[in-house]
Image (tube, helix red, strand yellow):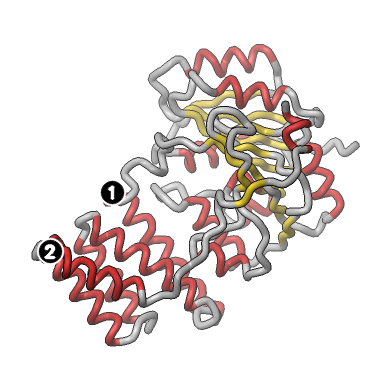
């Protein structure tokens, strides 16, 4: 058995009522060489008392508090990484659950493909009980992974990977200023770095992600800071792709991403951000002249409240949606055919 240490990185904010499930799944790991690095983000409930009790119970649990700005999970994750001593990193939120074999399976895979900087693993979605949905986070389709991310069909999010710590630090860790699309930005940046990775979708799902309406990323999805974060991800992606000479190759996916941002900004009433994004996309020839004109007309109709008229709203909705091809998303749509994963967890 390998003796490489896995650092489990967890940001925590007001999850005292639910973190016990996550903790139990860590303590039940068949692989013993781990440390749980938890950084509290200024909780106002009993989180610190609960977490410190775990630290007293097991010396592998290390509880820290965010000591610098900005507030948010990415800063907490980076603080945890800065204090971590492990060889590998896995990212786990306080409402998600590891299968008992998770760390063992991931370390085995990394040891087998030691040239990889990170490896992607399958995950499951659940609501209240681990087997109440039986839905895979996503599946392999054979399509280019970067293109899938751009089109909103990423094969994994942050929890779905095992990273070599040294490489994760090298690529710059988490972008702390983003309020949304942190995982998307991380994986786009990683694939454009580039890094070496492998997908092991042939293995059993080893992490269970909770589906919750009060997820921090779902609340206020079209709020201004989140729109601004999405614009930052778009502009970084286009700039980096221009540097690498691959923007044309991924133009279809970037157009899907840009469309989603512009529509969200207009619907959220953030007209300046929508206008700036349209202008930026025009400046890099992401859209043709007719498409730019259509988007500006759509923006104007919203600014002057004309989009409240059903006919006008339907007209622009259909026209805007026709700019990019329909994207087939697989996230949370595929049932797991085997029961072995649940047999090993329950």
Q: Which image quarter: residue 299?
A: bottom left
Tell me: 229 left or right of 268.
Answer: right
Which part of the image, by quadrant, shows the C terminus? Answer: top right
Q: Residue at x 73, y 54 (%)?
A: 201
Residue on which the image places disc 2: 309
Q: Is residue 82 visible?
A: no
The outermost residue toward the left is 304
Q: Which image quarter: residue 77?
A: top right
Q: Is residue 87 visible?
A: yes
Q: Residue at x 24, y 79 (%)?
A: 294
Task: Measuring from the top left, give residue 16's x and y in whole percent.
Answer: 49, 19
C-alpha distance separating marks 1 and 2: 24 Å
Task: Measuring from the top left, give residue 129's x and y in whole percent.
Answer: 59, 28
Instruction: State the SS at label 1.
Output: loop
Q: Earlier in the sequence, mark 1 or mark 2?
A: 1
Residue on which the image places disc 1: 223
């Amino acid at each position: 058995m390998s003796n490489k240490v896995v650092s489990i990185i967890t940001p925590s904010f007001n999850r005292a009522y639910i973190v016990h499930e996550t903790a139990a799944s860590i303590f039940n790991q068949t692989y013993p060489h781990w440390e749980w690095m938890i950084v509290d983000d200024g909780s106002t409930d009993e989180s610190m008392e609960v977490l410190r009790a775990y630290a007293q119970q097991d010396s592998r649990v290390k509880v820290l508090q965010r000591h610098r700005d900005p507030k948010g999970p990415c800063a907490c994750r980076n603080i945890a990484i800065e204090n971590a001593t492990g060889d590998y990193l896995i990212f786990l939120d306080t409402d998600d659950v590891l299968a008992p074999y998770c760390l063992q399976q991931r370390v085995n895979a990394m040891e087998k493909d030691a040239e990889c900087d990170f490896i992607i693993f399958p995950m499951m979605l659940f609501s209240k009980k681990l087997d109440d949905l039986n839905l895979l986070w996503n599946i392999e389709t054979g399509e280019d992974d970067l293109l899938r991310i751009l089109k909103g069909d990423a094969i994994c999010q942050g929890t779905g990977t095992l990273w070599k710590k040294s490489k994760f630090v090298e690529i710059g860790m988490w972008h702390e200023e983003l309020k949304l699309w942190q995982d998307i930005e991380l994986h786009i940046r990683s694939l454009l770095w580039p890094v070496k990775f492998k997908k092991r979708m042939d293995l059993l799902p080893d992490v269970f992600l909770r589906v919750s309406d009060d997820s921090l990323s779902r609340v206020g999805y079209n709020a201004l800071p989140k729109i601004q974060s999405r614009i930052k991800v778009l502009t970084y992606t286009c700039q980096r792709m221009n540097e690498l000479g691959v923007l044309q190759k991924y133009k279809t996916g970037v157009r899907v991403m840009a469309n989603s941002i512009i529509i969200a900004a207009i619907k959220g009433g953030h007209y300046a951000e929508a206008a700036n994004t349209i202008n930026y996309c025009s400046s890099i020839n992401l859209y043709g002249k007719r498409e730019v004109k259509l988007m500006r007309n759509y923006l104007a109709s919203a600014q002057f409240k004309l989009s409240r008229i059903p006919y006008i709203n339907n007209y622009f909705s259909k026209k805007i949606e026709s700019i990019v091809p329909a994207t087939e998303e697989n996230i949370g749509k595929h049932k797991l055919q085997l029961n072995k994963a649940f047999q090993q967890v329950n």
